Amino acid sequence: MLTISQLASYAGVTVRAVRHYHAKGLLVEPERDHSGYRRYDAAAVVDLIKIRILADAGVPLSRVKELLAAGDDDFKKAVAEIDKRLRLEIRERQSHRERIARLAHGDGLALPPEAVSYLERLRELGIPERIIEGERDAWILVAAQQPQSMEAFIRSKVGQLEDPSVVETYKQMEELLDWEPGDPRLEAIADRIVSQLETISPEDWAAYVEDDTSMPPELVALLDSMFVEQVPVARDLMRLVEKRGYTGWTKLERIEK
């Protein structure tokens, strides 16, 4: 026979918990013996362990009381239902863990894997983080509005990174972020951009245009407006590029002569 302290310790609960279960009518409270102690038998140990396990599993104490009074078949059926609920909760918790883990990965929180890989490639190439942040924000908008086209868009952008002059222009764009409208250095930037465009073969240009056809005009306008808002000299640069035969920014188009 066990004292209340021994019972609680063996079952892995506190004495206070045992008394709480007595008050709720879940565990029978034995009479005191001639020494003034309440003594608990093996059946009390089994019942207390059942109570603890069910309570730890989130089963309300009112339901625990019903289960302790149930027959073997009903008890096993109820345990199976509790197990099913717990397995569902585990899957949900795992899903939460995966989403929480994504919080530590920044870009991956709001972008598909191919876009995250593209941004990582920019970092590998030494592209300044301020430029990458602007790219990330733009890709989030594209992914939200044109998820079905992301793979094609990213494939096109990755291909452009094979050109060292494109990478160099990306790097120079960080300086441009701090320039004021009318800066004379914009002429050289516009020349570089147009020079890159002029190296595109007719076949590759056709593929570039085809990749862009699925981007709706309103999204193009939104991305262009982001560029204008974030870069003080954006309007000047776009105007200089247009003077050289190309219009737009997100979706550059040759001006027919």
Image (cartoon, rainbow, N blue to C red):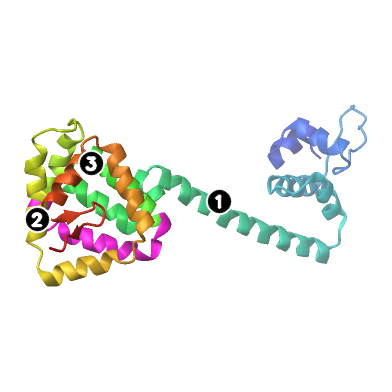
Q: Mark 1 against mark 3, which lies toward the viewer?
A: 3
**Alpha-carbon distance for marks 1 and 3?**
49 Å
Write the residue at 12% across / 63% down.
257
Write the residue at 19% across / 31% down.
178
Write the residue at 70% across / 36% down.
9
Identify the amino acid type marked 3.
Arg
Near mark 2 (Cα within 10 A), the count class, few <14, some 14-19 or many ≥20, is some
Where residue 187 sits: x, y (%)? 8, 41
Q: Is residue 25 left or right of residue 165?
A: right
Q: Is residue 217 above or below residue 41?
A: below
Q: Which residue is mark 2?
A: 196
For this orientation, the residue located farthest to the top is: 36
Identify the amino acid type marked 2.
Gln
Identify the amino acid type marked 1.
Arg
- Is residue 145 in the magenta section? yes
Where residue 159 sits: x, y (%)? 17, 61
Query: 34 and 241: which one is in front?
Result: 241
The main secondary structure of the magenta stretch is: helix
Query: 161 and 64: which one is in front?
Result: 161
Figure quadrant of the N terminus:
top right
Picture disc at residue 93:
1
Q: Quadrant of residue 143?
A: bottom left
Q: Which residue is mark 3?
A: 235
Which region is colored magenta?
A: 144-166
